[in-house]
Image (cartoon, rainbow, N blue to C red):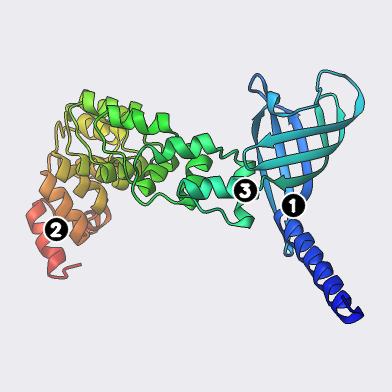
Amino acid sequence: MNRRQALISYVLIACSLVIALIARAADSRSGNWTLRLSDEPGKVEFGLITHQHGGSSQHESAWPLASFQGLDISKSGKQDAKFTITSDAGRFDCQGYLENGEGAGVFHFTPDPNYAQQMRSLGFPVEEDKQYSMAVLDISLDFARRIKAENLQDLDTDKLIAFRIHGVSPEFIEGLRKEGLKASNSDKLVAFRIHGVSPEMVRALHQLGYQPDEDTLIAMRIHGATPEFADQLKKLGYDHVDLEKLIAFRIHGVSPEYIEHLQKLGYRHPDPDQLIAFRIHGVSPEFVENLKRLGYENPTPDQLVAMRIHGVTPEYITSLKSHGMKDLTIDQLVSMRIHGIN
């Protein structure tokens, strides 16, 4: 080999080393950790903070104490700390200090080179920047296999991460299916966990005679139309209110307290549509009470709504009386407002 060939070889080798070091640096990540005692037995609150591209990210959750290899929190006083956390996705090497069960320090994350390949074989491609997040969330190969076995729609790596964040587990999916739900749409499963749709909620609704679909369950949780709410209405004589109307009750503020107040005023059982119309147009117990004081004892539900729509207020009635227009019927009052008689 002549000198020029040797020089070219050395340059190529050097470039290869630089590229390998850059790739390794891109894969690895460093940052700060914090640790404190948890209220959950056998766990600690562990936080990881990284700074990249002018910003920072932080994750803190309860981690099993058994995951911290080399950590001893039983000692009192201040002490140096050096421990390791190993997961399928990679290893966290941590150094710092502890004092009476609390501490902080720095960490270095090294990704497992086999993780991305094994995840890809399961149908979950892992980009370099996601492997760190998947290690933080402890998305294991076993978790990925078990979720894949559930045969879900639109399942990909991002959904797998979302499942771990929000607590969509195989046990949660199976629990929903035991209650008769298909539970196969990945986005809806995440929405279930975000809004609080649980197997227990579905079971309670079935016991009340309801058979809600998945979209209705999400809407019920968003608006607070819970089984407990339905049970309260049942005690007031509103048994098995249609679910869409139950949701409308919550949207417009038809509460058990509102119904009870109306019942005390003589409206024993307005139908669900009338109650919703009452709230939309502002028929309040106070409005009814003020009408009673003016001598209008028993307006019908339709009359009450018409009065609110057209602006027949207690103030308007009082003003007419002050001008000598007394003993007007509700229909006359509504007609006067429609025709602009002030």
**Any part of residue 205 in sight:** yes
Q: Quadrant of the N terminus?
A: bottom right
Disc 2 secondary structure class: loop
Q: Earlier in the sequence, mark 1 or mark 2?
A: 1
Answer with mark 3 or mark 2, whichever residue precedes in sequence: 3
The picture places residue 41, in percent across and down from the top left corner, at 65, 19
Q: Pick the residue in front: 201 or 182.
A: 182
Q: Is residue 168 visible?
A: no
Q: Give how far across and how far down residue 335 sits, in percent.
A: 9, 62
| Farthest bottom residue in view | 4
163 vs 342, left or right, is right
Q: Which residue is mark 3?
A: 133
Identify the residue position indicated by label 1 in the image.
Answer: 29
Q: Which is nearer the eye, 148 or 47?
A: 148
Q: Which residue is mark 2?
A: 325
Are circles 1 and 2 on residues that touch, CB within 8 Å?
Answer: no
The residue under label 3 is which amino acid type?
A: Ser
The amino acid at mark 2 is: Met
Amino acid of disc 1: Arg
Residue beneath the point at 40% across and 45% down: 191
- Image side of residue 279 versus residue 4, left or right: left
- Residue that appears at 74% across and 52% down: 29
Query: Residue 160 at x, y = what percent?
Result: 48, 45
Q: Where the C terminus falls, by quadrant?
A: bottom left
Under tag 1, what secondary structure? Answer: strand
